[in-house]
Amino acid sequence: MSFAAPEEYRDGELLIRSLRPGDGAELNRATVASYEHLREFMEWARPDTTVEDSEGYVRLSQARWLAGEEWGLGVWRGERLVAGCGFMLRGQPLEHGTVEIGMWVRADEAGRGLGTRVLRALVDWADADWPIHKLTWQCDSRNLASARIAQKCGFQLEGRLREHVPGVAGGRRTTLLFGLVRSDPRPWRSGP
Ligand SMILES: CC(C)(COP(=O)(O)OP(=O)(O)OC[C@H]1O[C@@H](n2cnc3c(N)ncnc32)[C@H](O)[C@@H]1OP(=O)(O)O)[C@@H](O)C(=O)NCCC(=O)NCCS
């Protein structure tokens, strides 16, 4: 499918846009400062990631974007990167219309409703501008904040995969699978 992905989406003062060359320094600041917050559930988190590593990542992310493989996004409040997220195909062609969302929130921004707000914005954006029928969300069964935001955004629990993959801190991870299809309610849109 030839699909020119939209580059950005605005939600008030937040700008959700593709990660691009030049974003590495701010991505590095955000992720290294968030290491303790991210390490339990994000296997890529490291305390000693360099700016060069982060710049390499955003360049790879841009290459994947252009190849239509994966759409890596940053959430910006002005010049500050407050969260990272993305639409991921996970081996399926886009024609199948099922895309997984991943997300992390900067440590000093977490627990204040930002993750919920960004996930709702991604659903709104997917509905409006992307050829997506179904959004999925996966998390470690111990990741209560992650499961909670999926449920707050209308995702339904569809599966619990016991001891499914290696856990970030060793052992095996039980994975919760959530899904949201086009006909599911978007409760945050129903105003008074
Ligand atoms: C998971 C994450 C994206 C959520 O973003 P956030 O901005 O912290 O989330 P919000 O503040 O919007 O909402 C968190 C919800 O989880 C709840 N929550 C948080 N910790 C919880 C816990 N230990 N037990 C139960 N509920 C919990 C909060 O109370 C809140 O729900 P409420 O609004 O009904 O009170 C963020 O915390 C994060 O980056 N975590 C580390 C990386 C990660 O795990 N990413 C997801 C991988 S699947």
Image: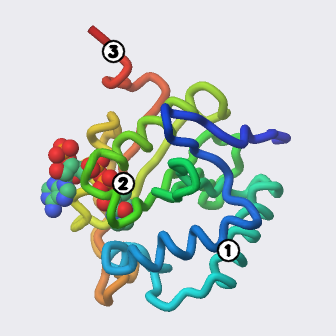
Q: What is the secondary structure assignment of the residue under circle 2?
A: strand
Q: Amino acid at mark 3?
A: Ser
Residue that carries the numbered disc 3 in the rendered image:
190
Q: What is the secondary structure assignment of the residue under circle 1?
A: helix
Q: CA distance from mark 2 to mark 1?
A: 27 Å
Q: CA distance from mark 1 to mark 3?
A: 38 Å
Q: Which mark is residue 57?
A: 1
| Quadrant that contains the N terminus | top right
| Quadrant that contains the C terminus | top left
Regarding residue 176, the answer to whether it shows in the image is no
Question: Badge 1 local density, few (<14 within 10 Å), some, or many (20+)?
Answer: some
Confirm or deny contact between disc 2 and disc 1 (CB under 8 A). no
Q: Amino acid at mark 1?
A: Tyr
Confirm or deny contact between disc 2 and disc 3 (CB under 8 A). no
Q: Quadrant of ligand 1?
A: bottom left
136 or 44: nearer the eye? 44
Residue 60's image quarter? bottom right
User: By what rule are the colours in the image chosen?
Assistant: rainbow
Residue shown at the point (48%, 36%) measured from the top left? 121
